[in-house]
Amino acid sequence: MPKGPTKREPPSTTKAPRVLAVTSEKGGVGKSTLAVHLAGALAERGLRPVLVDEDERVGSSLRWAGRGGLGFPVLAPADVKPRVLSACDVLIIDTEGRPKRRELRALAGRADLILVPTGVSALERGATRELAEYLGGPGEAGRRLWVVMCRVPPVGHAAEDAREELRDAGVQVCNTLIRSYAAYPKAAELGVLARDVRDPRAAAAWHDILALSRELV
């Protein structure tokens, strides 16, 4: 007797989360601070972020979450299960510190957006430009890489000048500047977000992060 048609499972309607990777070849640029606060800003906006700390040696984001309460999941790579992904809108990856170039190339293949924080110094700008040229260039890869100016002096125009210099070199740079405020290290010590610390500039710091989150997602 011939068999009837095989019953097929209905197609999945689960939308894959947007993957945003925060990475840098240079230490001390505020990579984990940016990753933690971006996740917090997205959560405040009603999205469902998950932050994955891939820096197994230092684990800054995991340590940060362990000191307080952030209001969103911060996981090690081994804890990222399919059910976790199905329940989130944005997956933020805090990469290891100073990853190798081949690892960055692999990262570019799995992320929807690569965010590279940089400072305003000539050394940092040069290193960021080289990384952008390596990972980006013409085509889709280049359109998925964005640089964000971090640890910006709250006064003066150094960051605006640095931003335009990078743009003139063909690098995509976010409009939002993340200014340097004491609220960020205070938040790291307490395991919370900058908005939650008692500091006269906490609101200004949080405003920068919210503006960046809206520019990216």
Image: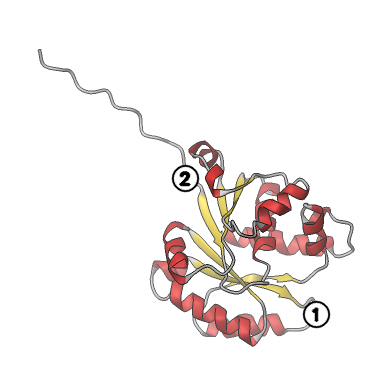
For marks 2 and 1, give the CA distance: 41 Å
Check the image and report above or below for 200 versus 124: above
Q: Nearer the viewer, residue 81 or 37?
A: 81
Question: Residue furthest toward the top?
Answer: 1
Residue drawn 47% across and 45% down? Answer: 16
x and y percentages locating residue 162 in the rendered image: 64, 83
Marks 2 and 1, the one that precedes in the sequence: 2
x and y percentages locating residue 131 in the rendered image: 50, 76
Which residue type carries mark 2?
A: Ala
x and y percentages locating residue 193 in the rendered image: 77, 54
x and y percentages locating residue 205 in the rendered image: 78, 64
Residue 2 placement, left or right of 171 = left
Question: Local crowd at mark 2 within 10 Å, few (<14), some, or many (≥20)?
Answer: few
Q: Which of 155 and 180 is in front in this view?
A: 180
Residue drawn 48% across and 58% down? Answer: 112
Check the image and report above or below for 62 versus 100: above
**Location of mark 1 (residue):** 155
Residue drawn 54% across and 69% down? Answer: 146
Q: Residue 16 carries which label?
A: 2
Image quadrant holding the C terminus, namely: bottom right
Q: Is mark 2 on a helix, strand or loop?
A: loop
Q: Can residue 127 be seen in this view?
A: yes
Q: Is mark 1 on a helix, strand or loop?
A: loop
* The image quarter in which residue 125 lies: bottom right
Question: Residue furthest toward the front?
Answer: 57
Residue 88 placement, left or right of 155 = left
Q: Is residue 194 visible?
A: no
